[in-house]
Every structure is written in structure tokens, then in C-alpha cells.
Image (cartoon, rainbow, N blue to C red):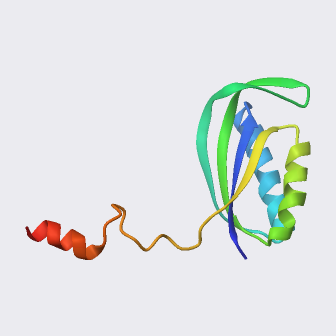
């Protein structure tokens, strides 16, 4: 199963309501056969622009990342479900790389790095 990351922006709510939305979302993923690996809270921030969703205007939101493995076939139904959720302002699913890049971070090969440090 491929690895995905779900980026969520939830409307500004109190902590218990936010936890309930996250619980609902994770349960929806698991009901559809996904394996949730991690849930990361990125905090509450001002939105870059006003967003109108479900007859409400939002200026602040809580940002979350959910890391999960699932079959690609469930993504459309998941996004449709989240689109109808009145507490979700924005949702995006991104496919994550399963393997890190093999090249060094600087763009140079290990042989070049060794020559530079020995000089």
C-alpha cells in the first residue's frame, strides 16, 4: 500500500471539538482499510486569505498532518467525505516517497566530498 499524507485545515474550535473531528477522520480512514502511522498538530494560525465554506467565513484554522498507508482506490471517497464535513475547511492528500533520496544533500558525490575535506 502506498504512503500518503493528509493535510487538514480545521475551523477554529475548542480543544474537545477539534479532537472529535480528528477522531472522526482517523476512524473514517481506518474503516476504509488505511493504516494511520502518525498525526501531527501544526498549530492554529491565521489563514492566508478568508475562506468561505459551508456558509461560514473562516479567518483562522487549525493545521494537522495525518500520515497513513492505504489503497489508492479509497482516496476519492475520503476526499468526498471530508468535503462534506462542516468542520473541515481544506483537505489535501499528497503521496509520500517511500524511500529517501540516495544522493547526499549538497548535490555532490561522496568522492567529491572526500577530496574537498582532504585538501
Q: Position of residue 30 (x, y in %)?
A: 81, 66
Question: In this orientation, which residue lies closer to the viewer: 49 or 35?
Answer: 49
Taking the image as shown, residue 66 lies to the left or right of residue 98, namely right
Instruction: Give the answer, above or below, for where 46 lies relative to 93.
Output: above
Taking the image as shown, residue 50 lies to the left or right of residue 102, namely right
Q: Give the position of the N terminus as an image quadrant.
A: bottom right
Identity of the residue drawn at 18% across and 73% down: 114
Q: Position of residue 31 (x, y in %)?
A: 86, 66
Question: In this orientation, which residue lies closer to the viewer: 68 or 100?
Answer: 100
Q: Give the position of the C terminus as an image quadrant.
A: bottom left
Taking the image as shown, residue 112 lies to the left or right of residue 16, namely left
Identity of the residue drawn at 76% across and 46% down: 91
Q: Position of residue 86 (x, y in %)?
A: 88, 37
Question: Of all residues shown, which one is farthest toward the left?
Answer: 119
Question: In this orientation, which residue lies closer to the viewer: 87 or 72?
Answer: 72
Instruction: Give the answer, above or below, for where 75 lies relative to 60.
Output: below
Identity of the residue drawn at 66% across and 28% down: 47
Amino acid at each position: 500500500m502506498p504512503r500518503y499524507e493528509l493535510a487538514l485545515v480545521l475551523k477554529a474550535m475548542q480543544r474537545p471539538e477539534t479532537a472529535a473531528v480528528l477522531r472522526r477522520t482517523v476512524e473514517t480512514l481506518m474503516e476504509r482499510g488505511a493504516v494511520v502511522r502518525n498525526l501531527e498538530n501544526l498549530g492554529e494560525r491565521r489563514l492566508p486569505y478568508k475562506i468561505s465554506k459551508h456558509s461560514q467565513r473562516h479567518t483562522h484554522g487549525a493545521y494537522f498532518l495525518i500520515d497513513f498507508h492505504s489503497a489508492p482506490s479509497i482516496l476519492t471517497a475520503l476526499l468526498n467525505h471530508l468535503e462534506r464535513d462542516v468542520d473541515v475547511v481544506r483537505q489535501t492528500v499528497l503521496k509520500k516517497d517511500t524511500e529517501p533520496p540516495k544522493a547526499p544533500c549538497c548535490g555532490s558525490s561522496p568522492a567529491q566530498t572526500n577530496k574537498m575535506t582532504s585538501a
